[in-house]
Amino acid sequence: MRSISQRPDLYCINTATLGFKTSLSEIIDECAKRGIAAISPWRKELEESRPQDILRKLKDCNMSISGLCRSTYYTAPNQTEREAAINDNRKALDLAAELECSCYVQVVGSLSGYSKDLEDARSQVKKGIQQLLEHSRQVGVRIALEPLHPMTTADRSCLSSLRQALDWCDELDPDGYYGLGVAVDVYHVWWDPDLYSQIKRAGKRILAFHASDWLVPTTDLVNDRGMPGDGVIDIPLIRSWVEDAGFDGLIELEIFSHNNWWNKNIASTLDVSIERMSKFC
Ligand code: ZN
């Protein structure tokens, strides 16, 4: 297991952590000042500037983009909307390629309309990913399936565990090309009794590692994530499993926190982030 204490060159900041109130350009400057290796931005943030300008700025700062966040949901009440979602995701892959992102992160969607048919939702997602995979090979950007905590199954993700994500990888990308892999986000998978065995199984399919902490009590199903050290997840243990499985990428901090971290200024959040990642990741 790598020593990552005071190694911002091994850290990535998911820009969600900073509350979507600052331009990407300013975020890159603040991260670069601290020696942080990469960011994972959101597509809506990239609409404000030309991709080539962002890429040039990152290169000038000796930084890169880890994952591009995130997919348009694949599930929809009708075929027209599902096809529109796939086209949208295809465009996002082009953007990810232009920005030289290491992967395109997938939050897949779930029940749509008034459906109660989870199996159907899962099948819609798999069909969508399958159609996208060929494009991912062409543009050279890998697709990272991110299983979300089961509490989000109704509205955000019918993909709820690492085992399920790896089953989909084996089914849709059986030839070992590894165009399809997984993002292991500790917030979503820490509870899973199969976590160790599934991380071992994942091996080189692990394309991203996201860190944050589970607060007790948690007050919001999406936007109350804790800074590492403030909750109950043994992040270093999970990181040791991921690295034993062969992952040697960046440690990404991803926090959604509308009542706490999003209210602070980004310089102080970045300083705390480095300190906490050093001690608790
Ligand atoms: Zn994540």
Image (spheres, rainbow, N blue to C red):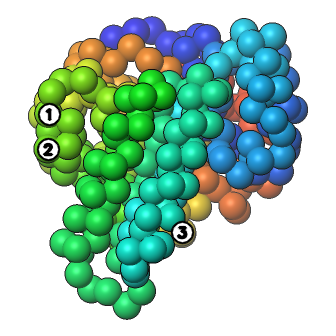
Give the residue number, with chain letter if any, for mark 3: 220
Secondary structure type for disc 2: helix
Viewer-nearest of discs 2 and 3: 2
On screen, 271 above or below 230? Answer: above
The disc, 2 or 3, on the residue closer to the chain's N-terminal end is 2
What's the mark number on residue 105?
A: none
Q: Position of residue 196 (x, y in %)?
A: 17, 34
Give the residue number, with chain letter if any, for mark 1: 174
Count of all numbered marks drawn on residues in the image: 3
Give the alpha-carbon distance from disc 2 to disc 3, as whole Å.
34 Å
* Quadrant assignment, res 205: top left
| Quadrant that contains the N terminus | top left
Q: Position of residue 267 (x, y in %)?
A: 83, 33
Q: Amino acid at mark 1?
A: Pro
Which residue: 38% across, 74% down? Answer: 79
Q: Position of residue 14 (x, y in %)?
A: 61, 37
Front one among 169 and 256: 169
On screen, 131 above or below 169? Answer: below
Q: Residues within 10 Å of mark 2 (few under 14, many from 20)?
A: few
Give the alpha-carbon distance from disc 1 to disc 2, as whole Å.
6 Å
What's the mark number on residue 171?
A: 2
Secondary structure type for disc 1: loop
Asked whether the viewer can see residue 226, the reply is no
Q: Residues within 10 Å of mark 1 (few under 14, many from 20)?
A: few
Viewer-nearest of discs 3 and 1: 1
Q: Amino acid at mark 2?
A: Glu
Q: Are marks 1 and 2 in contact (CB under 8 Å)?
A: yes
Q: In screen coordinates, is 99 left or right of 159?
A: right
The disc, 3 or 1, on the residue closer to the chain's N-terminal end is 1
